[in-house]
Amino acid sequence: MHFLRNLIILFLICIAIKINLCVPTIPSSLKTLPIDGHFDFKQVHHAAKDFGNRYSFLPSAVLHPKSASDIATTVKHIWEMGPGSDLTVAARGHGHSLQGQAQAHRGVVINMESLQGPKMKVHTGNFPYVDVSGSELWINILHETLKHGLAPKSWTDYLHLTVGGTLSNAGISGQAFRHGPQISNVRKLEVVTGKGEVVNCSEKQNSDLFYSVLGGLGQFGIITRARISLEPAPKMVKWIRVLYIDFATFAKDQEMLISGESTFDYIEGFVIINRTGLLNNWRSSFNSNDSAQASHFKSDGRTLFCLELAKYFNPEEMAIVNQEIMTSLSQLNHIPSTLFKSQVPYIEFLDRVHISEIKLRSKGLWEVPHPWLNLLIPRSNIHIFAQQVFGNILTNTSNGPILIYPVNKSKWDNRTSVVLPEEDVFYLVAFLSSAAPSSTGSDGLEHILSQNKRILELCEIDGLGVKQYLPHYSTNGEWRSHFGPQWEAFVHRKSTYDPLAILAPGQRIFQKAAPLSL
Ligand code: FAD
């Protein structure tokens, strides 16, 4: 009897010690770390928010690092706590994730934007590049490199994102057909691994880590510095849009353009569903004549496909560029009355989404739920996808832009961690929906999520070979199926660089302290 009572007391003491060890003392052990930056244990709510506005996981602490060494010290400390601690670490770039990917439930969020590495440095010469912090915003890189007449080759549509955030995914925009995604335009990285080691890597040095991190969803290391390839920057951009009624003709023209060498510098496209008035509401960057011209064309509620093109130039090349554009346009089969042209400075073209952001913010429409769905679809199945989705699922309206454009797989490096469809050409289809807060109608969150679900089910049932971009899954089985034959290599990389699964817990691929399984 005595023995049993003592056993129970011992058991209770053990629980008390464990609770004491695991919960309250974690922040205090962080407090004693020798770092130049600081931890915040109170103001942590900001780190539980992101652009998606749907997930919120409160961390125990936010680290505001001053250097890569602050990050390394913190991660190493947590690594040394061993598998018994539940503490995880999420790097937070600009927090533009959609489903809590940069959050860490009761863990440590690293506010990358407080990192104060060496200043951004542009190197001119035959193969120009820029060395930047992993926390740098692409818009700042644009401003700095332009001072030297240079700029990165590959972009995202929106530039207020960090280098670490986009390189963890891929970084895709209308230049990707020619230059590949942003992860194809990086020469070198400095990374803090899940063991708290600071490692330099490139194609030649620690190459496995280099390719693991690119498109690696933050699983293998925190990018603290990156070397990005540059090219001479143009001053101006001819920005062109043409419309199609027939998807097959639209896709054929897009594919013809991305296979040519000297067509355009940027090729995208988007879908316009059942909005007769939309032509008059095109982005303000198009001149007012467009509305007048557009009003002659009536879509009568039909779904339209808009091809969006850009050609870079310098003023002295105007005549030859106009000639080249005319030649390229003459090969297209768009609706003849729908050719809209504009001419803007290069910087204005690249930063175009920011103009929409300012407008949406002023109307309180930026910080709403964003149930986005991004898919990569093999060329051979894009027609059946378009027919089903735009013909059956999204017939009435869309709740935001729907981008659709092809890219060449040959411009992607298959050593990176990113997961792609199997064919040489695949389409990015991005449903960039905004949900009206508290609406229960067709613009509400539930309705949009159920549409997304129907789209995913269609891909699954018809076996379309689709991969999610900015993937989000909740079960281990779904992640395995996403990675397919790449799963084993991904798990092997994880066990090499972050064996305790400390990093990027918000992606929900691996669980800390859970055994890594193949
Ligand atoms: P965060 O949301 O802060 O982080 C994203 C993930 O990366 C997290 O898992 C985080 O832990 C990890 N991470 C962050 N920093 C680092 C680091 N330094 N090292 C390692 N891991 C890190 N994507 C495109 O490809 N093309 C587009 O055109 C495009 N347009 C967009 C437009 C808007 C308005 C928005 C909101 C997003 C867009 N995206 C686009 C998606 C965007 O690239 C990703 O959401 C990206 O992750 C956001 O960057 P961030 O700095 O906000 O990252």
Image: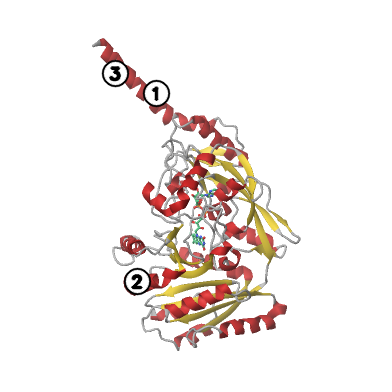
Give the residue drawn at x 61%, y 72%: 265
The residue identified by callout 2 is 388
Disc 2 residue type?
A: Gln
Camera-nearest residue between 499 and 149 = 499
Camera-nearest residue between 215 and 301 = 215
Disc 3 residue type?
A: Ile
Q: How many C-alpha atoms fall within 10 Å of the one at disc 1: few (<14), some, or many (≥20)?
A: few
Front: mark 2 or 1: 2
The residue identified by callout 3 is 8
Q: Tell me the distance, in whole angstroms, between the alpha carbons under discs 2 and 1.
A: 58 Å
Front: mark 3 or 2: 2
Q: Position of residue 89 (x, y in %)?
A: 49, 41
Q: Secondary structure at mark 3?
A: helix
The residue identified by callout 1 is 17
Front: mark 3 or 1: 3
Q: Tell me the distance, in whole angstroms, between the alpha carbons under discs 3 and 2.
A: 63 Å
Camera-nearest residue between 459 and 71 = 459
Along the horizontal axis of the image, is 213 left or right of 235?
A: left
Among the two numbered marks 3 and 1 on one chain, the one whose residue lies closer to the N terminus? 3
Are the two marked residues, 3 and 1, in contact with CB atoms closer than 8 angstroms? no
Q: Position of residue 296 (x, y in %)?
A: 45, 89
Q: Secondary structure at mark 1?
A: helix
Q: Quadrant of residue 398?
A: bottom left
Among the two numbered marks 2 and 1 on one chain, the one whose residue lies closer to the N terminus? 1
